[in-house]
Image: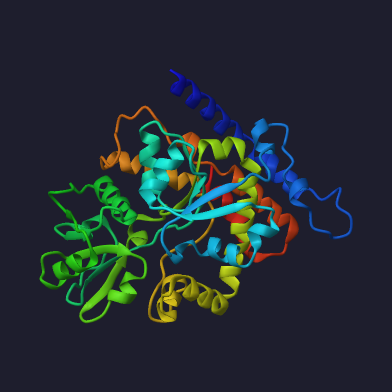
Amino acid sequence: MKKLTRRSFVKAAGATAAASLGAVALAGCSSEEKKDDAPASNDAAQQASPTEEPFMSEGKGEHLVCAVTGKLIKIAPAIIAEQKGFFAEEGCDVEFQTIALADAMASMSVNRLDIDLFGVVPACSYVSQGAEIYVFGGTILNGSEMLSTDAFDRELKTAEDFRGLRINCSREETGQMALKNYLQENGLTLGEDVFFEYVDNNTTAMEGLRSDQCDLFITNNAMGYSLGKDGVKVAGVVRDVTGDYPCCRQNCSAEAYTSKYLSLVDFEVAILRGYDYYLNNKDEVIQMLVDYSSQEPDYVEAAMYGTDTYRNVMDLSPDPHTKEVKEFYKALQNINEIERDTPYDMEPYAVSGIYRKALDIMLDREPDNETYKKLDAEFSKNND
């Protein structure tokens, strides 16, 4: 009973937060009290509007523990923010710890970890089982590509284009779940009209391609760059078939959300600054990520920016894309990845208020910044 009561409170808080976004935006754009052109401080920009929950104007200066997985460079805005000192400049006391994704989600579900920068599928899975994990920002949108041999000559644009195909993929690859749902929603029966098989590693999948045991291998961004040779090519990308779908997200625990709200806003401000830096300082960022990951410069460039001959399909936008997250939750139900009849909904846990506040702060500081103007223009389309 306590669990249901707690969730009922959180649902109400989430609804209130969504309703208050307009007021937050107006507060962030107001300049009547500013003198000269001095940028507003975080404290001023983070004042709560009358419709906010009290906790949304509290929790500044709290210590945050953020999990990262290995040396993956897809969290580039966070890496940049840490190395350029943006977290410190925003007064964000964040500690990064290397933690396996499964352990990170388990720890967040019991409030022993504040933030994780990976995993939309585990977040949805935990919520479907009654845990309270909030998706408050973006790490990666899209990202999966489909490899084939050079002999494969079928265009991959509609569901019918996949009829009869044998597709290898790893279980954790988000794009294969988005594709399964799309194919099922458009008339194909999984296991009858199109066949998916899980493989443990790239080597097994590539052997399957070359020996004609499968037609496609769905894999992560930039694998097409490193594996697309010796008769193997990128036959298509999942996003071009399904439309946008969420991949890695910024997730946080219920305690962090309700007790460290303004600290999360400061965290997001630093991430936004890191994202803007990533977009506008390519050469420096490539070297920074090479030093961070020990990957080769050409791979880092392909993975993070693309090249003249290789298309990078990852979108590193920090926008939470709450609409896509909630749609993806339903997609996981449709393909039986999570329980279809779960009583728990993703609605209260895909939240955009933290990101909106952070974006308003940056728009107030740098009103002519094209990165923040573009994110602002896209906000309503991506979020409720």
The residue at the point 56 percent across, 69 percent down is 278
In the displayed structure image, the side of residue 313 where residue 375 appears, left or right: right
Figure quadrant of residue 303 = bottom left
Q: Position of residue 226 (x, y in %)?
A: 32, 76
The residue at the point 54 percent across, 56 percent down is 318
Figure quadrant of residue 339 = top left
Query: 258 and 383: which one is in front?
Result: 258
Figure quadrant of residue 269 = bottom right
Q: Is residue 122 visible?
A: yes
- Seen from this angle, which residue lies furthest top? 1
Looking at the picture, the colour scheme in use is rainbow
Q: Is residue 123 visible?
A: no
* Image quadrant where one finds the C terminus: top right
The residue at the point 16 percent across, 60 percent down is 165
Q: Position of residue 262 (x, y in %)?
A: 66, 43
In the displayed structure image, the side of residue 153 where residue 30 appears, left or right: right
Query: 51 and 241: which one is in front?
Result: 51
Residue 280 vertical position relative to residue 336 in the rendered view, above or below = below
Q: Position of residue 77 (x, y in %)?
A: 55, 63
* Image quadrant where one finds the N terminus: top left
Q: Position of residue 25 (x, y in %)?
A: 69, 45
- Seen from this angle, which residue lies furthest right? 35
